[in-house]
Image (cartoon, helix red, strand yellow):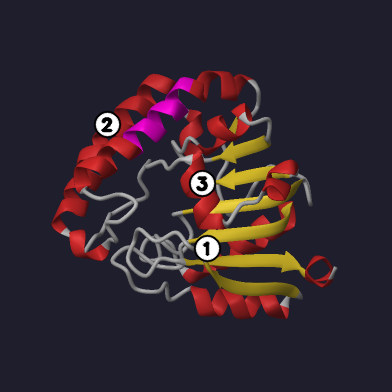
Amino acid sequence: MFTLDQVVPWGRSFEEYSAMFEITDADMAGRVLGCGDGPASFNAEATRRGASVVSCDPIYRFGGAELEARIADTYEQVIDQTRQNQHEFVWEAITSVEELGRVRMAAMQAFLDDYQAGVVAGRYVDAELPSLPFRDGEFDLALCSHFLFLYSRQLDEAFHQASLRELCRVAREVRVFPLLALGGAVSPHVEGSVELLRAAGYSVSIERVSYEFQRGGNQVLRIRRAELADG
């Protein structure tokens, strides 16, 4: 079973974000927060497209050279785990472990190339859930990729629920992908979190998306303020 002892820096591309979260042009016209983005190239690529994106992650307290070293250390660990657990993944868009390595490293290199300029511009912010340094409703859309739910063994239900409430505070809409924990089972924190958010008055849905790399990982959690969902 694919497992990690702690959260590791591992990045995905703008194209993968678009598929995972079913991002539209209208979504990118607003102000977007990527929470826990790590070394994803989403911010760099979205910025080149003229979008307004802020990424937050505690790894942004480090400099570029240290991040590059951390990525190199993570690469071997994740690729080795993937090679040992290939049955847990869908090898279609990405056809092999070797191709996965090339695709992920290309995304993370794009992040590294953009990192210093992004820090200066305020696009990469050292911050972490469940307490974010942003104003209420500062963003139109908040995205959380491969952090909440994925690390369900490392992060308990209270952390997940506090984090989701915080994302809902700073953004009009929140999307979280995937709903699976490491190893491929649905996170035990999903059901309780959905109930909590609905009780708090949010419109919550679990929607199927076309993206699937982690086998069975083809659903996104979508949370909106009730008045927006009705509008």
Give the percent coordinates (x, y) of residue 176: 55, 60
Residue type pointed to by label 1: Phe
Q: Is residue 117 above or below residue 128?
A: above
- State yes or no: discs 3 and 2 in contact (Cβ < 8 Å): no
Quadrant of residue 11 within the rendered picture: top left
Q: Nearer the viewer, residue 124 or 100?
A: 100
Please tell me how crowded label 2 is: few (under 14), some (14-19), or many (20+) other residues with Cα within 10 Å: some
Magenta stretch: dominant SS?
A: helix
- Magenta extent: 104-113
Residue behind mark 3: 36
- Could you tell me if the residues under marks 2 and 1 are in contact, i.e. CB atoms within 8 Å? no
Label 3 environment density (alpha carbons within 10 Å; few <14, some 14–19, many ≥20): many
Question: Where in the figure is residue 203, as x and y percent of width and height?
Answer: 72, 73
Q: Earlier in the sequence, mark 2 or mark 1?
A: 2
163 relative to 117, above or below: below
What amino acid type should be assigned to the residue bearing mark 2?
A: Ala
Q: What element carries label 3?
A: loop
Q: In this view, does 197 lie to the left or right of 108?
A: right
In percent of the image, x 58 and y 24: which residue is there? Answer: 118
The residue that mark 1 highlights is: 159
Rounded to the nearest angstrom, the CA distance separating label 2 from label 1 is 29 Å
Disc number at residue 105?
Answer: none
Q: Name the residue under label 2.
A: 72
Earlier in the chain: of badge 3 and badge 2, it is 3
